[in-house]
Structure formats: C-alpha cells, structure tokens
Image (tube, coloured by chain):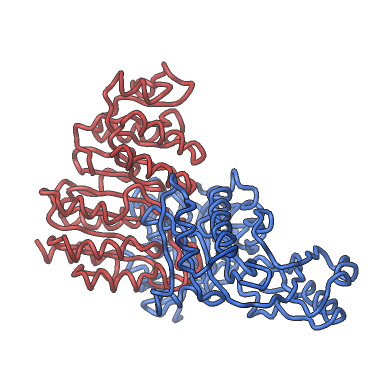
Chain colours: A blue, B red
C-alpha cells in the first residue's frame, strides 16, 4: 500500500500463492526477511516474520508460512525483503485526534518500538504537531518535524516528502492512523520498513479497501452477527448475553463481572428489533454453548412483547437451549412478562433481581 | 443546548420511515416543527408539515433555527452541510455510521460559521415538558434541575427513567452520541450546563473510548462548582474490541473506563458504580 503512494520501501518481492514460491524466491538475494501477510496483528510474536540465510531456507519458510493458520486466519501472501543496513530508526504517523477534531503529525527518533510506551515515559522524545483537515499538512509543518528529527541535506527533503505522502494517504483512504514504524535511515536514504493503518468501517461504501478488509477479518460468528444486523463481540465467559443498546449492554457486562459472573459475549440487538432479529440473536448465542443466557431489554422503540415472543419461539425450537433469565422494562413490558409467564418462563422488571436469579440458576 | 421550547424545527429526511415516525412523536410532545426537507419531494406534506427541496427555502419561508437529521449515513454530509450553509443555529444528527472524515468536515464548517452541531449516532436533546428533538422516549421524566449528558442511548434512557421515577426533574437531556468525532464533545456540553442557571447538578454517562471524559475532568477541575455525578460503562470491556458504538474501543491503555473514572474522581466528580445508583446519589445532593 505504501509503495503505491511512492513511499520508498526496501527492495522486495510479493508471493501471492504457494505455487509461486520456487520461481520468485530464486530471484532474490539472501540473507533476507520473510514476512507473512495476515489479517490480524502480532505477526512477529506468532513467528511469522523470520530471517532466511539462504535460498533453501527462504523456500522452506515460505512453504511453512502458507500452511500456517493463526486464530482461524490464513497467511494470504508473503513478502521477501532485503536486509537493510540501519543507521537510525524513526517513527512517524498521521493520527486523528478525535476529541480535538484535528490531526497530528507525530514523529520520533525512537523508532521501531512501541510509541505509546515512549510517549508515556519520555514525552519529550516525541514531536507532535497539530493541523486541521481544511488546512491539511503543510510543507512548513512537515519541514518543522523533519528538522526536529535532525534530518538535513537530501534526507530532510526525503523526510518532508514522506510526511506529506502520509497525509495524502490518510485523506485518500480516510484513515484515522497512517503509521510508518520504523522509518529507517540506510546508506541509500530513508525507507519505510513496516507500517499500519486504521481505516473507517463507516466509509466502506466508498472505500473498496475497507470492504475487502472487513470481509477478511471477521470470525464465523461475527459474520453471522453482521448478517443479522447486530453488534457482537465474543468474550471468554460462559453466560450468554442478549441486550439492547451498546452502553446498556456494556453496563450489564460490568455488573456481572463485578459479581464474578463471566459473560460469553457482548450482543446489542439494536433498536426496534423485530421478532426475527431477536430470534437470530438467540440462535447465535446458543452456538456459544453458554451455561445460561441473560436477556436484558429496555424497551424504547424495542417492544418487550416482541422480544418475549422471540424467546418463546427459540425455547420451543431448541430443546437443548440453556436456562434463560429475562429482564424486560419499558414499552409493552407487562404484555411481554405475561406472555413469558404463560409459557412458564420467569421474567423480571428489576435488573438486580434478574442478576440474583441468574446467579442462583448457575449454582444449581 | 442552544434550544428552547421556542425553537423552530426543520426535519431533514422527513419523508423517510424514521423521519416520519419520529416527526409524529415530536409533534405529539409539543415540538414546534415548521418544515421538512427531502430533495425532490418539495410541495408534499407530512402530518400537515410542508416539505421543501432544500434548506435555503426553509429558512426563508419558515425562519427555522434548528434542524434534526434522519437521512441515511452516506447523505448526511450533504444534508448537514446544507443546514450549516443555511445558517441553522443547531443541527442535530441522529444518523448512525456517518464516516469520520465527514464529521471532521462538518465540525470545521460549524466552527467557521459559529453554529452548533450535536451527534452523530445520538438520541438528540430533550428539555422535559418543553421540547423533544430526538428519538428518546418522551415519558422518562419531568422538568427540573438535573442536566444529563450521555454518550449512549439506551443506557441513558434507563438512567433518566430511573431518575424520573424518583421524582427528580431534569433541566435537559443531551445525547452527544457514540461516534469518535462528535459535533459537541462532552467537555463542551458540560461547559454549557455548568453555566446554565436552571441546572444544579450534572450527570455524565460515559463509556470506554476517546479521551473526552479525561478532557471533561480537566474542565470540571478548573471551572465547575456544581456537583457532577458520573457513570462510565465498559469497566470489564476487552482491549481492542469495538463494543457496539464506533467510538467505544480501548486501544492499549487509552480509553479505559478505569482511566476515566480516576480522572473524574480526581476532578471531584462522584462515580456511580452501577447505572441504578445514579438517582440515589443525586438525592443526596438535593
């Protein structure tokens, strides 16, 4: 991606499938770095970036990487990159300051390491210059940062150009972060060795790159949730959660965690949920095989009676459904609670009563 | 926030399902809706409200000073820009999933023109018994002296209703929205109600993500003498996961609930452990 925007990179080749390994790997000189391209972070930790001393080693690493699966994700491509001689490592990025509604050009002489650590321990080691969207990153601001980094001569202009390119990328792709870390000084000039971007899911309709990434990074269950139209995050506990409102769902998870009851998921079924949507959400939660399910609905535009109908339907259709504790309040709460009672399901209006009941159910 | 029962309101996207539904509820509440806008549908009427093609006509024909936007996300930039260019004083964006860069452009335009924006992805503003400009339930509470400022929707309804159930009145309910870039960030809303003579107590409903609670804490420390009661959701949220709202994400140790609680406590705000503790904490101050 950085290459497309004319940011200088180390010499490299891209291998897109295992069929190409032999042919392409032979064209490179070694030692070289073998980098796997995968849709999740932490590549280095997962052992997916290694140095190959010889061509044979490179080929065998490539074969191994293409067969590696990490948390359900496969290696999609491999980059073989020259080992560059590093005189100095830098950090640079363009970052959105959301609450300040402005942008920062951030740069540091301490590249290659965790910038958040540096900013906490030695904030003076970080250059941070702000600018607005409409003014954009000007040559003057870029020059000020490059000068403060200690760049001079031809490197100064190279640094300025790279910073300006970063802003061009941020604007074009609507990125909230475009980062090069490290940016390294080699005998032949500055090159970007590694980088990352944070893109905006909400801009997917006009940013094809976001669409492609969205499809890649979702787990099976997250895909189902997306199809169903609700927000879902899988957690490590054993209590299934169906609630409405992101804030209210988070608050519920906090209350449970406080009582050492561990949620299996976050699921916000959304406002004005239909019977079908609630049913689908329950179906998804049942797939997590929770010990019990807690339903917490505050009916505004969501109707409690419709939620109750979906619960009854789900319990009728899933004979192995876990025990359920239900709390309904707001629009049509009485109708909802009556419906559930008639079906022999206990329901509460008070959240704390529901949580106590859940605790009791789990202890049985 | 810069609105009153005298505000003259235009609904942008009035002919859509959401726009139409909530226009009805707002009229029933007593909100003075003077116009609607949907490009290409000028000349129609919705519940007796005239529909116009563009905002410029609306301000000339009706003198509207406040807009509420229900158009789909990809048209929100254009709709809100039209509202700002027509000189509408307060524009409330209800729409969810508005691209972040669109919001940046809108915020800069609003600043340039000294106009106000709230949202996006927000329930709107309610001044109980006077004006409802949003999608929140109208029957949560009556008028009084507690201002409620919230990043979330449903959670704030639950808390506001609990406050109302204890017969505590509310001077204003402001949903600032769950997106990372807000037309009115939390610290600006707090500044407004800190100066508002009708407000005695401020309730903040925050959540993980962004540093607005931290900035608000700094503001409170220096400028606010009224009691501030805060609830922050997401104490148990995992790092790196978006919890429903686009803005609700912890990255590293940026945006944690614990960090926000610590900052607010240090500034003298009182922290509610659960949403349901908020009403009794307000009572202790009345």
Residue occupying the far front of the picture: A153
Residue A270 image position (x, y, % from top left) = 46, 52
Q: Quadrant of residue A197?
A: bottom right
- In the image, is residue A121 above or below residue B32? below
Quadrant into which the N terminus of chain A falls: bottom right
Between B102 and A84, the one nearer to me in the picture: A84
Q: Quadrant of residue A77?
A: bottom right
Question: A335 left or right of B243?
Answer: left
Between A51 and A288, the one nearer to me in the picture: A51
Residue B78 image position (x, y, % from top left) = 46, 34
Residue A185 image position (x, y, % from top left) = 61, 72
- In the image, is residue B8 above or below residue A50? above
Which residue is found at the position 49% from the left and 69% from the top? A149
Question: B85 left or right of A199?
Answer: left
Which residue is found at the position 20% from the left and 43% from the top? B128
Residue B68 image position (x, y, % from top left) = 35, 36
Which residue is found at the position 11% from the left and 48% from the top? B198
Question: B223 left or right of A109?
Answer: left
Q: Quadrant of residue B190?
A: bottom left
Question: A329 left or right of A190?
Answer: left
- Could one spot residue A237 in this view of the protein? no
Q: How many marks?
A: 0
């Amino acid at each position: 991606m950085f290459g497309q925007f004319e940011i200088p990179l180390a010499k490299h080749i891209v291998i897109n499938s295992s069929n190409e390994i032999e042919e392409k790997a032979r064209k490179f000189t070694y030692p070289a770095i073998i980098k796997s391209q995968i849709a999740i972070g932490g590549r280095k930790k997962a052992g997916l970036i290694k140095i190959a001393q010889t061509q044979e080693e490179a080929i065998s690493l490539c074969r191994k990487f293409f067969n590696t699966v990490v948390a359900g994700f496969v290696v999609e491509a491999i980059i073989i990159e020259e080992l560059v001689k590093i005189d100095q490592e830098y950090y640079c990025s363009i970052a959105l300051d959301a609450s300040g509604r402005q942008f920062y050009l951030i740069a540091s002489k301490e590249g290659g390491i965790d910038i958040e650590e540096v900013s906490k321990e030695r904030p003076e080691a970080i250059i941070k210059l702000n600018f607005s969207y409409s003014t954009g990153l000007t040559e003057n601001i870029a020059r000020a940062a490059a000068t403060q980094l200690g760049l001079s001569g031809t490197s100064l202009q190279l640094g300025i150009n790279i910073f300006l390119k970063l802003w061009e990328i941020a604007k074009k792709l609507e990125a909230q972060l475009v980062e090069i870390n490290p940016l390294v000084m080699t005998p032949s000039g500055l090159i970007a060795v590694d980088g990352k971007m944070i893109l905006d899911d909400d801009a997917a309709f006009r940013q094809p790159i976001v669409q492609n990434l969205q499809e890649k990074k979702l787990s099976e269950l997250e895909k189902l949730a997306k199809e169903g139209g609700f927000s879902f995050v899988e957690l490590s506990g054993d209590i299934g959660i169906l609630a409405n409102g992101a804030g209210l769902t988070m608050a519920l998870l906090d209350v449970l965690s406080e009582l050492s009851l561990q949620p299996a998921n976050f699921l916000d079924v959304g406002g004005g949920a239909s019977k079908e949507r609630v049913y689908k959400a329950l179906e998804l939660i049942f797939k997590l095989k929770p010990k019990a399910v807690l339903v917490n609905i505050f009916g505004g535009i969501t109707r409690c009676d419709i939620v109750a109908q979906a619960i009854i339907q789900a319990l009728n259709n899933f004979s192995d459904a876990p025990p359920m504790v239900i709390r309904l309040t707001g629009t049509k709460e009485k109708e909802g609670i009556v419906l559930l009672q008639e079906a022999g399901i206990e329901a509460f209006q008070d959240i704390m009563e529901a949580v106590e009941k859940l605790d009791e159910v789990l202890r049985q | 926030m810069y609105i009153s029962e005298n505000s003259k309101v235009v609904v942008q996207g009035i002919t859509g399902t959401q726009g139409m539904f909530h226009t009805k509820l707002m009229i029933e509440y007593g909100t003075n809706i003077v116009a609607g806008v949907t490009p290409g549908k000028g000349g129609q009427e919705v519940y007796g409200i005239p529909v116009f093609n563009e905002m410029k006509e609306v301000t000339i024909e009706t003198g509207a000073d406040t807009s509420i936007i229900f158009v789909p996300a990809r048209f929100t930039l254009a709709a809100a820009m039209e509202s700002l260019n027509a000189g509408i004083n307060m524009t409330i964006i209800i729409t969810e999933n508005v691209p972040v860069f669109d919001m940046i452009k809108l915020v800069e335009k609003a600043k340039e023109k000294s106009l106000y924006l709230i949202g996006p992805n927000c329930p709107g503003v309610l001044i109980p018994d006077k004006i409802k400009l949003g999608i929140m339930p109208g029957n949560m509470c009556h008028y009084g002296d507690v201002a409620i400022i919230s990043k979330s929707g449903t959670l704030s309804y639950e808390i506001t209703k609990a406050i109302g159930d204890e017969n505590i009145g509310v001077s204003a309910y402001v949903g600032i929205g769950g997106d990372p870039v807000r037309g009115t960030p939390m610290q600006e809303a707090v500044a407004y109600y800190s100066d508002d003579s009708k407000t005695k107590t401020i309730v903040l409903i925050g959540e993980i993500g962004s540093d607005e609670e931290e900035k608000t804490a700094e503001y409170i420390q220096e400028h606010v003498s009224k009691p501030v009661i805060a609830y922050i959701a997401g104490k148990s949220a995992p790092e790196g996961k978006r919890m429903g709202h686009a803005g609700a994400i912890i990255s590293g140790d940026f945006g944690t609930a614990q960090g926000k609680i610590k900052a607010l406590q240090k500034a003298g705000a009182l922290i509610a452990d659960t949403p349901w503790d908020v009403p009794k904490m307000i009572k202790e101050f009345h």
